[in-house]
Structures are given as C-alpha cells and as structure tokens.
Amino acid sequence: MSLNGVSFSYAAAERDSLTRLDLSLRPGEFVVLAGPSGSGKTTLTRLVNGLIPHYYAGSLSGQVLVNGIDPSACPLWRLPVGSVFQNPRAQFFTTDTASEIAFGAENLGLDRAEILRRVDEAVAALGLAELRDRSVFALSGGEKQRVACASVAAVKPAIFALDEPSANLDLKSTGQLREIMAGWKASGATVVVAEHRLGFLRDLADRVLVFADGQLQAEYSGAAFRSLGDGQLHRLGLRSAWGKTMAATSPPDGVDCFEVEGLVCQQRRSQAPGLSAPARGQRIEIGDLRIPKGKVTALVGANGCGKSTFAAWLGGLRRDREGRFSDGQREWSTAQRRRRVFVVLQDVNHQLFTEAVAEEIALALRLASPTSQPLLSVDQIMESLDISSVADRHPMSLSTGQKQRLAIGAALASGRELIVLDEPSAGLDLNHMFGVANALRMLARSGQTVVVATHDTELVAACADNIISLDRPR
C-alpha cells in the first residue's frame, strides 16, 4: 500500500487535511497513526478504505494504491479493506447483533455454513457470547464498538483500517480488542489504526506515525516508540496511560450531597434518541449513591454496567419506577431533573440544534435559568474549549471531538445545578482532554456539581474529586 505526493482537502474546507504525503506500508505491517485531533489521521484511514473520494467530496491529488488498486477507480466492495469507525452506529445495517456480524460475510456471497462459522469465530474471539442476538439499539457505546469489530473480523480482509476503536471501551474490552488485533497481525493482515489511547498498542506496533497539521511530523519504529517515556509522549501531544485501576471513593460524612435511593433501571419500549438501554428483561440495580455537591464525580465501570443508563436517569431522560433523587432535602421529580440537570450524551449528534457553533453556545446561554449567572461569554467558552476557529461552522460539519467539546460548551453556558456527561473525552487528544478536565473543574469551582461517566483513566486523574464504581456492591 502506498501514497505518493497525496494531498486532500474536504469540500469547503479552508486548508488541506493532508499535504504532500509520501508513505509506504508493507504487507502484514501494524501501523499506528498518532497525533492531535485534526492532524489528518482519520483522513488517511479514509484514503485507505476508499471513502475518499467515493463518499467524502473534496480535492484529491497524488496517487493512492491499496494492494495495487486505485481506490478511486474501483467500487468500494472490491477493496480488500475492513473498517471500524469511531462511531460504530455509522456502520450498522441490521437490528440485531448476530445479523450485524454476519452482514459483511453475507455480502461476499459466502455459503451459509461458512458465514455461521465466521460469526461463531468472531463472537468467541471478542467475547461477545452475552451480546449475541441482542438488539443493536440496546447496547452501550462500548458494546456497539465490540460488535463493529466482530463484523469486520468476520469478513477477514487483507487490510484493517480502524479509527479510534478503543474510544468507548473499558479496560477489559480494550484488552480483548488488543488480542483480536494481535490475531489479525499474526494472520499476516495489514493493520492501520488511528488512536489517541496508545498504551494498549505499544507492543503491537511495527511503526508509529505522528501527524500534525496534515503532515507527517515524526516516524518511529515500534521499538523506538516503546522506549519513549510519558514526558516525551506528552511533548508530542500524545496520550500514554492505559490499564490503570480506578478505585472507588466515598464522600466523607457531613459533606452536602445529592442522594440516589433504591434505583433500579429496566428496559423500556421507547427511549430518547441516542440513549442505550438494558437488554430486554435486564435489571440494572444502581442502589443508593451519594454525589458530593460542587465537586467532580467520576462514574466508572465495565461496558454495560449501567453508566449511560444512570446518566440518562439523572437527567430525567428515563422514567424508571424504582428509585428517587433528592438534593438532600427535597426530592426532584423526573420533570424537575429535566429542567435542572444538563446532560451531554455519548452521541452528541442528537443534541446539537443550531446552524453554527457560536449560535449553539448562545442558545444555551439564552435558555439558562434566570437566576444563574453565566461564568463566561460565548467567545470565552469557545476559546476555553479550542473551538473558536470553527465558530461559524455548522455543528454537523465538525469532527467528533469538536462536536463533543461544543456540547460541553453548551453545558458550561447552561448554568444548570447538575451537569452530567457521558464519555466526554472519547476521541480527544491529550491537550483537548486536559481542556475538558479544566472546564469540568471550572464548573465545580463555580458551585455546580459534575458527574462524568467515563473509562478514561487520564481524565479521572486530571479532574475527579470522587469516584463511583458501578461494578462493585454499593
């Protein structure tokens, strides 16, 4: 696979996403693409899998060859590339997990016995037995990512292109993902992975390519990259931590807390768009919890343990009969929580409403409670989250990380008493992750209470005052 003098700019973009890139990948090589958000990593994966130019319009120059094939000159189905996107919902075609895993193999025209064998193999390799035959709409974000990986594994392409595959995975699932990727490498497949969380890939990488501003900034052999310390990685703007445990903590007696009592969440027929739900008949017992006021509380636990479900319940987006929420003195009804809690969803596409980034922040300020005092202006909020440069862009034209930061900006502007965020650092590079951590600390300093559902150990270390684990008895 080779790229010779390749430049690409998206339609209506002001600058190239990649500029004069020369790159050659050897068959069977495991290559990690690193660098800040917007540096060109995702664009490179789209050149490899042919989404550029077949799906993403823009100006492309230079030559791209994938196993000797020019992607622009042949239909996508003929390219020997399997892709895993950052948002797995964008690549789902069916309504249940078994059908989704089988979908790619079915489209290759394989016989039924071979398709079933490949589905069984992928399910076993990724530890998905408990997710088999589940509705894809009843999965957590991390569970959806694992199913997407299994659907690609069942196709057995010569090349795998993955964009932030660990963004929504817990430590156990990330370890399982690492093992399946190690299996792809051992089978002789070429693997290209764009990632911010690099720790779990360090032992697999044959090469690490670091991008900045659309250009290849640095190139390391796997051995050379493994020799870099955290300080060196941070100077390159790269994240490093992976595999650190996050022990639960308890607020001291006497601390003013929000209180959750006897909460049990069950699957419902309908729910707000963008929310995951328990499997049919499943009960998620949250129990009793204390959330200290004016602090940042991290909500941690394995994929599917109920973090997103609990976050939605806190925001009044679920009507579960068992459970009550109070501010320590008065109970808040579901309707009251909808007015007094701001929720940043894991899939923020469902909560961006305006035609421009600045308008989105301004809308949140206008809708803020009359009694709340805005901490920052629209311009200050955008600057604090590094989205000033896209102030006039339509929110749907932004990258995943930019959309996430925009939704957090709306939370900053809302003035709500309780801010709940579901995986706010998914897809963020080191500097933007610290920017989000600073924003959450600023909210807490202003007296607002912040609850963050996350797998991100670096984010927890950077901002959390308290940790609640949903994996343990409470």
Image (spheres, helix red, strand yellow):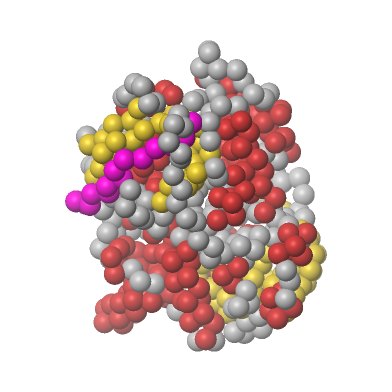
Nearer-the-camera pick, 467 or 212: 467
Dividing the picture into quadrants, the one containing residue 242 is bottom right
Which residue is at a point 51% across and 17% down the rendered structure image? 369
User: Percent position (x, y) of residue 243?
Assistant: 53, 65
User: Percent position (x, y) of residue 438?
Assistant: 65, 40
User: Percent position (x, y) of residue 457?
Assistant: 55, 56
Which stretch appears magenta?
A: 280-293
Q: Is residue 29 left or right of residue 251?
A: right
**Vertical position of residue 413 compared to residue 246: above or below:** above
**Vertical position of residue 453 compared to residue 103: above or below:** above
Q: Is residue 442 left or right of residue 156?
A: right
Outermost residue, top side:
370
**Is residue 214 visible to us here?**
no
Nearer-the-camera pick, 413 or 28: 413
Is 289 in the magenta? yes
Q: Is residue 19 left or right of residue 348?
A: right
Which residue is at a point 67% across and 43% down the rendered structure image? 435
Which residue is at a point 47% across and 64% down the rendered structure image? 171
